[in-house]
Each structure stands twice: as structure tokens, then as C-alpha cells.
Image (tube, rainbow, N blue to C red):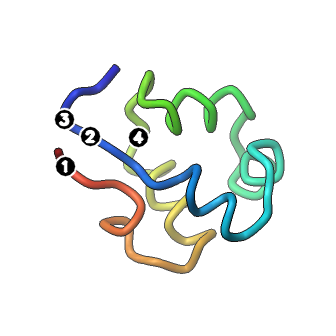
Amino acid sequence: MNEDLDNHIHKLRLQHKISQQELADAIGVSRKTISTVETGRFTPSVVIALRIAAYFAIPVEQVFVLK
């Protein structure tokens, strides 16, 4: 688990009423990738982070935050 990085992916998914699979399909990754990023077991690449932020139409800093 990354102790320096936190994210709001779960909260954003709930607000937009989408599943991990729907988000994964939309940004071109596996559901497992979304799951591991969301739970902090995997630190995403810049590309994945930017795709997630773009999907929700918010700045990447509103998705990912340094602890």
C-alpha cells in the first residue's frame, strides 16, 4: 500500500453511479487495475491518473492527493 498517496476514486464512482468495470472500460484498463489503484495497493502511471481525472472531468489533484 502506498503510504504517500490517497485517492477519491471510490467516492467519485459512487457519485457517478458507475462500477469499477465501467470505469476500467472507459479508460482502457482492467477492472483489477481500477481496484488496486482505488485501494492503494498500486500507484497508477501518470497516464492512468490523467485518464481517470479526464473521465470525471476534474483536475488530477481532485482525484489523487498526497498524504
| In this rendering, the label closer to the viewer, 2 or 4 | 2
Give me the residue at 69% from left, 40% from top: 29
Tell me which numbered mark, 2 or 1, is placed earlier along the sequence. 2
Residue 58 to residue 50: above or below: below
In the rendered image, the residue lying farthest to the bottom is 57
> In this figure, which residue is indicated by the disc labeled 1?
66
> In this figure, which residue is indicated by the disc labeled 2?
5
> In this figure, which residue is indicated by the disc labeled 3?
4
Tell me which numbered mark, 2 or 4, is placed earlier along the sequence. 2
Per the image, label 1 sits on a secondary structure element best described as strand
Per the image, label 3 sits on a secondary structure element best described as loop
Tell me which numbered mark, 1 or 3, is placed earlier along the sequence. 3
| In this rendering, the label closer to the viewer, 4 or 3 | 3
Tell me which numbered mark, 1 or 4, is placed earlier along the sequence. 4
Which mark identifies residue 24? none
| In this rendering, the label closer to the viewer, 1 or 4 | 1
Residue type for callout 2: Leu
Q: Is residue 33 left or right of residue 22?
A: left
Give me the residue at 72% from left, 70% from top: 16
> In this figure, which residue is indicated by the disc labeled 4?
45
Tell me which numbered mark, 4 or 3, is placed earlier along the sequence. 3
Residue 12 to residue 10: above or below: below
Q: CA distance from mark 1 to mark 4?
A: 15 Å
Residue type for callout 3: Asp
Per the image, label 4 sits on a secondary structure element best described as loop
Evaluate if marks 2 and 1 touch, with contact meaning CB atoms under 8 Å apart: yes
Residue 31, image x and y in percent? Answer: 74, 34
Give me the residue at 62% from left, 32% from top: 35
Local crowd at mark 3 within 10 Å, few (<14), some, or many (≥20)? few
